[in-house]
Image (tube, helix red, strand yellow):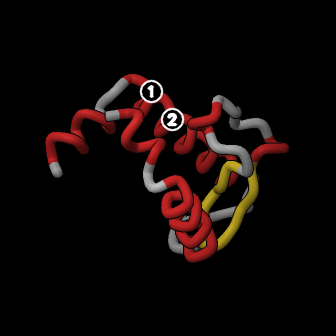
C-alpha cells in the first residue's frame, strides 16, 4: 500500500541506494555499454543492500528480463524479508 511504500522508499538508505544505481547506469552509458531504449540494465552482482559498492568488478550489464527474473527469484526465496525489514 501507499503508506508502506512511502515509508521505505523515502528513507535515507533507499535514496542513497537509488543514487548509487543511477550513478552506475550513467557510468555504463559513458562507457558505451548501455544506451537508452536498449532493454539492458546495469546489475550489481552483489547488491547494494548488502553494503557492496559501485566498483567495476561488482557491475555487469544484463537484459532487463534477466535482471527482473533474478530479483523475482530472490524476492520469492526471501519472501520479501529485505522489504519488510525496511518498513
- Give the secondary structure at mark 1: helix
In the visual, does 66 lie left or right of 82? right
Q: Which mark is residue 53?
A: none
Q: Residue at x 60, y 50 (%)?
A: 25
Q: Tell me the quarter of the image containing the C terminus.
A: top left
Q: Secondary structure at mark 2?
A: helix
Instruction: Please provide percent x and percent y for residue 66.
Output: 63, 73
- Disc 1: CA contacts within 10 A as few (<14), some (14-19) or many (>=20): few
Compared with 27, 49 (above or below) is above
Which residue has dot 2 on it?
17
**In the visual, does 55 lie left or right of 77?**
right
What's the distance in space between the residues labelled 1 and 2, CA to CA?
Answer: 6 Å
Picture coordinates of residue 70 (x, y %)?
Answer: 61, 66
Image quadrant in which you'd find residue 8 = top left
Residue 16 at x, y percent in the picture: 48, 29
Q: Is residue 28 left or right of residue 16?
A: right
Q: Residue at x 50, y 63 (%)?
A: 76
At a point 77% along the width and 36% down the height, the residue shown is: 55
In the picture shown, does residue 62 fall above or below 4? below
The residue labelled by disc 1 is: 13
Amino acid at each position: 500500500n501507499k503508506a508502506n511504500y512511502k515509508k521505505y522508499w523515502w528513507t535515507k538508505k533507499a535514496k542513497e541506494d537509488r543514487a548509487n544505481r543511477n550513478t552506475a547506469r550513467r557510468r555504463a552509458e559513458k562507457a558505451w555499454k548501455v544506451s537508452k531504449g536498449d532493454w539492458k540494465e546495469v546489475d550489481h552482482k552483489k547488491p547494494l543492500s548488502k553494503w557492496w559498492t559501485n566498483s567495476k568488478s561488482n557491475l555487469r550489464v544484463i537484459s532487463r528480463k534477466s535482471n527482473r527474473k533474478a530479483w523475482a527469484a530472490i524476492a520469492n526465496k526471501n519472501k520479501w524479508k529485505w522489504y519488510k525489514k525496511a518498513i
